[in-house]
């Protein structure tokens, strides 16, 4: 099974090696490890000596040890800086979740993963995104009982199985040395760490630290050509992995970390890993999923089908939500992150959780505003004989005042309107709803006169909201053949003028009036031109608003396009160029798109907004309403 490769970032897997005495350290410094010089020394064959023997160590060698260690940590911090910078540039919750997965995969060395977002406050959204996992593979994971998966137990607050406790380390002896009966053997220990004959000395180690073994000039050097680095080695006991170190007094741990065997691919039970970034909020490492005792049969089946052999799950918590979700990274072979990789991931997680919490709050606010806007706009377009309608609307991330309406009027007439209310946010959305409701009331009473509708609307806005301005375009078309047919049958009814008039549903006449709004665009096979409405100011901008209306007669097959100024601003061009691009997009539509208003609006938006209608980076609302007059 092929999986997407994690892109290389600074400090991860460098291709160049260092100097001879730092070559082993350079390999471990790729992820900010402590260099090989800080690891516990390995035993050397009795009687052998060489230029690198500790007996011949010089102050320069000890300085090189400190420099190598600092270089490793600088590499790790550089990696964290690059990854947090990339995360800070994300503007949506979905983009941030994908970036967290990519960054975590680079830090822990896993090719695939998933983030299960389930905020603890229950307000949503609940979603799952994957890295290197398709929808089918994510679906397979969802069929596994949650209690059988590490991330499910973290989400539900379930305790880890009794076999999942971290293996205990050897207890220190009464004099501060590790109580290991093998420590007196001259051969290296089971992990390649040589015993220290000085470990039985009754005196405490340097700086009064009982546990650990100090590096001394007479210590045994590592075997030639072998790396002496062990995960977590070189740390001062009792100090954090990134604690202070002094030249000549580096104290490597006498035993490897508890997850060393798992990291090398040996079977082992789930290991509870304390995350350095947030004490008390542990992650769970499963270094060998298929080799774990008491494995759920469904877990074995899904792991075999997906092709993962190990996992590392880390929770993400941030106030005030609490637990946001859990990220899981999957390994193709039995493996797991060492202590230093976990520490880097903990540092990254501390920042990522706060960033995700902020984006989660913004996501909820945007969805609440979008839901409010959708509730104030038509849920569906009316069906009028001889006219096909289509609309596209997108509210900005902060909520805006762009709106539209298509309302059936008495006697088979139709009213079309688009408008924009000044401002943004919930106040603008509420004002838009009031303006649209008022226009509908005036249109029902005097819709055949668009100028009168806008005049009444301007008076209402001036009396009720004098500090707010608005632009509106209103178009009215009556049923062809007059307001009523023979015998008084209403337009559009069987036997009415729509069905009985000779020549089908034509001629139709459109009466258009605007108050500071963009002119409509009429497009068809023979022409694509803007309807020249008379110049007029937005509502409440002048002491007395008044403008004449314009009458047009669309030909069969032509489409009238009404739009908001947000569509033009979203192009990023000046006004003249934006108008020209809109006209060119409509004129260049293929024949099949002209015959379907749904296809026509999609074609125009695709030409004008290649980044898509719902662009979170743009604050503009967009409205595009199309009315095609059938032959």
Image (tube, rainbow, N blue to C red):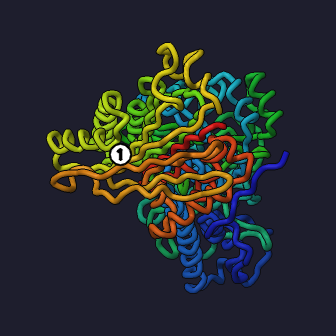
Q: Can residue 517 be seen in this snapshot? A: yes
Is 606 placed above or below 553 here?
Answer: below
Q: Which residue is at the front of the view, 85 or 469? A: 469
Question: What's the residue at 41%, 46% (across, down)?
Answer: 512
Query: Would you say 133 lies left or right of 462 here?
Result: right
Q: Residues within 10 Å of mark 1 (few under 14, many from 20)?
A: many
Q: Position of residue 258 (x, y in %)?
A: 63, 45
Q: Position of residue 101 (x, y in %)?
A: 61, 49
Question: What's the residue at 66%, 44% (across, down)?
Answer: 599
Q: Which residue is at the front of the view, 294 or 148? A: 148
Q: Indicate the secondary structure of the residue bearing disc 1.
A: strand
Query: Would you say 271 lies left or right of 401 here?
Result: right
Question: What's the residue at 69%, 62% (across, down)?
Answer: 7
Identify the residue under disc 1.
401
Q: Position of residue 208 (x, y in %)?
A: 41, 61
Is 342 placed above or below 213 here?
Answer: above
Question: What's the residue at 43%, 42% (across, down)?
Answer: 475
Q: Which residue is at the front of the view, 444 or 44? A: 444
């Amino acid at each position: 099974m092929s999986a997407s490769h994690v892109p290389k970032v600074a400090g991860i897997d460098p291709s160049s090696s260092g100097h001879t005495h730092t070559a082993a350290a350079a390999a471990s410094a790729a992820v900010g490890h402590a260099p090989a010089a800080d690891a516990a020394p390995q035993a050397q064959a009795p009687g052998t000596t060489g230029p690198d023997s500790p007996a011949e160590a010089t102050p320069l060698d000890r300085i090189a040890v400190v420099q190598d260690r600092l270089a490793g940590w600088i590499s790790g911090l550089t990696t964290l800086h690059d990854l947090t910078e990339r995360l800070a540039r994300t503007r949506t919750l979905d983009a941030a979740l994908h970036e967290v997965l990519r960054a975590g995969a680079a830090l822990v060395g896993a090719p695939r993963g998933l983030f299960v977002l389930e905020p603890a406050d229950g307000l949503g959204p609940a979603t799952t995104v994957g890295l290197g996992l398709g929808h089918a593979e994510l679906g397979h994971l969802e069929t596994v009982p949650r209690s059988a998966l590490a991330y499910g137990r973290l989400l539900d607050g379930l305790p880890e199985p009794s076999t999942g406790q971290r293996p205990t380390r050897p207890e220190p002896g009464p004099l501060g040395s590790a109580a290991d009966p093998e420590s007196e053997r001259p051969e290296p220990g089971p992990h390649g760490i040589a015993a220290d004959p000085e470990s039985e000395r009754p005196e405490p180690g340097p700086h009064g630290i009982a546990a650990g073994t100090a590096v001394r000039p007479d210590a045994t050097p590592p075997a030639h050509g072998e790396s002496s680095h062990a995960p977590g080695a070189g740390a001062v006991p009792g100090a954090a992995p990134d604690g202070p170190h002094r030249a000549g007094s580096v104290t490597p741990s006498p035993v490897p970390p508890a997850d060393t065997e798992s990291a090398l691919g040996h079977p082992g039970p789930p290991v509870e890993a304390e995350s350095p970034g947030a004490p008390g909020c542990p992650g769970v490492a499963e270094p060998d999923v298929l080799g774990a005792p008491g494995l759920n049969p469904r877990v074995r089946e899904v792991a075999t089908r997906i092709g993962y052999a190990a996992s590392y799950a880390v929770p993400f918590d941030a106030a005030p939500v609490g637990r946001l979700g859990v990220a899981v990274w999957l390994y193709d072979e039995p493996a797991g992150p060492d202590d230093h990789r976990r520490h880097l991931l903990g540092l990254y997680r501390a920042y990522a959780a706060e960033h995700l919490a902020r984006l989660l709050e913004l996501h909820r606010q945007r969805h609440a505003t979008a839901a409010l806007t959708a509730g104030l706009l038509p849920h569906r377009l009316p069906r009028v004989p001889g006219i096909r309608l289509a609309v596209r609307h997108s509210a900005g991330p902060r909520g805006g005042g762009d709106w539209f309406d298509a309302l059936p009027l008495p006697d088979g007439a139709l009213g079309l309107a688009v408008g924009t209310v000044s401002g943004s946010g919930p106040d603008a959305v509420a004002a838009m709803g009031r303006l649209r409701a008022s226009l509908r009331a005036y249109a029902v009473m005097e819709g055949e006169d668009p100028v009168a509708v806008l005049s009444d609307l301007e008076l209402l806005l001036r009396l009720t909201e004098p500090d707010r301005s608005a632009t509106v375009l209103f178009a009215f078309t009556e049923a062809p053949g007059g307001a009523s047919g023979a015998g008084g049958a209403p337009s559009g009814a069987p036997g009415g003028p729509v069905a009985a008039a000779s020549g089908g549903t034509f001629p139709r006449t459109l009466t258009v009036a605007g108050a500071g709004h963009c002119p409509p665009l009429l497009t068809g096979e023979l022409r694509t031109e803007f309807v020249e409405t008379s110049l007029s100011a937005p509502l409440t901008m002048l002491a007395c608003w008044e403008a004449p209306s314009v009458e047009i007669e669309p030909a069969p097959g032509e489409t009238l396009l009404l739009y908001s100024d947000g569509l033009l601003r979203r192009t990023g061009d000046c006004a003249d160029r934006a108008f020209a691009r809109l006209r060119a997009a409509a004129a260049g539509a293929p024949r099949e798109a002209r015959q379907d208003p749904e296809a026509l609006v999609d074609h125009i938006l695709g030409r004008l907004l290649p980044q898509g209608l719902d662009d979170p980076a743009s604050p503009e609302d967009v409205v595009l309403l199309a009315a095609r007059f059938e032959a």
